[in-house]
Image (cartoon, rainbow, N blue to C red):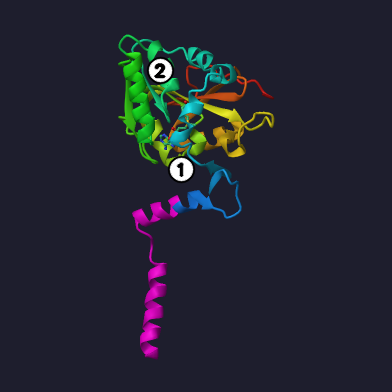
Amino acid sequence: MRIRLQVFIVLALAGSLLPLHADEKAATKENSRYEMRGDHDPNGIGKFYMGREIAYVMGFAGASWLERSNREEEERITLLIRSLNLKPGQVVADIGAGSGVISFLMAEQVLPDGKVMAVDVQQEMLDRLKKFSETLGVTNVVPVKGTQTSTGLEPGSIDLAIMVDVYHEFEFPYEMMQDISKALKPGGRLVFVEYRKEDPLVPIKEVHKMTQAQVRKEIEQPEFDLHWSETVHLLPRQHVIIFQKGPAGSPLKAVDEPGK
Ligand SMILES: C[S@@+](CC[C@H](N)C(=O)[O-])C[C@H]1O[C@@H](n2cnc3c(N)ncnc32)[C@H](O)[C@@H]1O
């Protein structure tokens, strides 16, 4: 009995010393990328990525808040979309589209032959968006059901992707960024609209806000091939942080206004 136990211990130790296979290495890396903590914000899921707690996904019950009549005044969404200088014929992605408020604003700008790929993980949101499309007679907004790790967009198919109040909810931000970067065309733009965490007066729950420094830290990891091009200080409560896919030293001028 004692001999059998000794053999078992030797074999177990030998196993733990063997080199890891590629898939085991990937799993270890994935586990170390995220950290679960017991002590956390009640509005967060207790999972941390690069020092930041991930927020709960806003459920379908929040759709009417996205469509609230004073959103224009609070968030200046029409100004936001105009500032993107979208062009007719472009294919743009609204990632985390919700019920489509932002998608419909962009759809007008890319007419006559451009389209908006409206990606969301919640089928109820996409159903509501589809209903609005029918009511409004909009034919160039395409609902796309994504997953927590993938958008479902074709590689190299997108001129501009925007996430309005979404990124901080991604349960797997690293995997989503790999996927979004792949979906962008070379030179394509990626736009983050996030409530400013630097400003304590912005009346939004803490885990639903982000600092510009944190967004840049997470997105400028070299494997994403995304390069910060500018931060536009335009909106009353949110950052508009723009990256470009492709080599650094891109044709876009890098403009920052320190201190904002
Ligand atoms: C706060 S809402 C914003 C909706 C929309 N962008 C707007 O401003 O009207 C966030 C949305 O992101 C979606 N979302 C969260 N994680 C996602 C993921 N991994 N992929 C796609 N959508 C996601 C949620 O289902 C929700 O509809």
Instruction: State whether label 1 is within 8 Å of ligand 1.
Output: yes
Q: In which quarter of the image is ligand 1?
A: top left
Q: Which residue is identified by label 1?
A: 171
- Residue 100 in percent (x, y) is at 41, 23
Q: Is the magenta stretch mostly helix, strand or loop?
A: helix
Counting residues from the start of the chain, the first of labels 2 and 1 encountered is: 2
The answer to whether 151 is drawn above or below residue 74 in the figure is: below
Residue 213: give its label. Answer: none
The segment highlighted magenta reads 1-30
- Quadrant in which the C terminus appears: top right
Is residue 14 visible in the rendered image? The answer is: yes
Instruction: State whether label 2 is within 8 Å of ligand 1.
Output: no
Mark 1, Cα crowd under 10 Å, few <14 / some 14-19 / many 20+, is: many
- Residue 154 in percent (x, y) is at 30, 29
Q: Quadrant of residue 160?
A: top left
- Residue 231 in percent (x, y) is at 57, 22
Residue type, label 2: Phe
Residue at image location 61% in from the left, 21% down from the top? 256
Residue at image location 59% in from the left, 20% down from the top? 74
Residue at image location 58% in from the left, 29% down from the top? 195
In depth, the one of 252 and 204 nearer the eye is 204
Q: Residue furthest bottom?
A: 1
Is residue 9 within the magenta segment? Answer: yes
The answer to whether 195 is drawn above or below residue 88 in the figure is: below
Tell me the distance, in whole angstroms, between the alpha carbons under discs 2 and 1.
26 Å
- Residue 66 in percent (x, y) is at 49, 26
Q: Which residue is identified by label 2?
A: 104
Is residue 21 within the magenta segment? Answer: yes
The answer to whether 260 is drawn above or below residue 168 in the figure is: above
Q: How many labels does the image show?
A: 2
Q: In which quarter of the image is residue 201?
A: top right
Q: Tag 1, which secondary structure?
A: loop
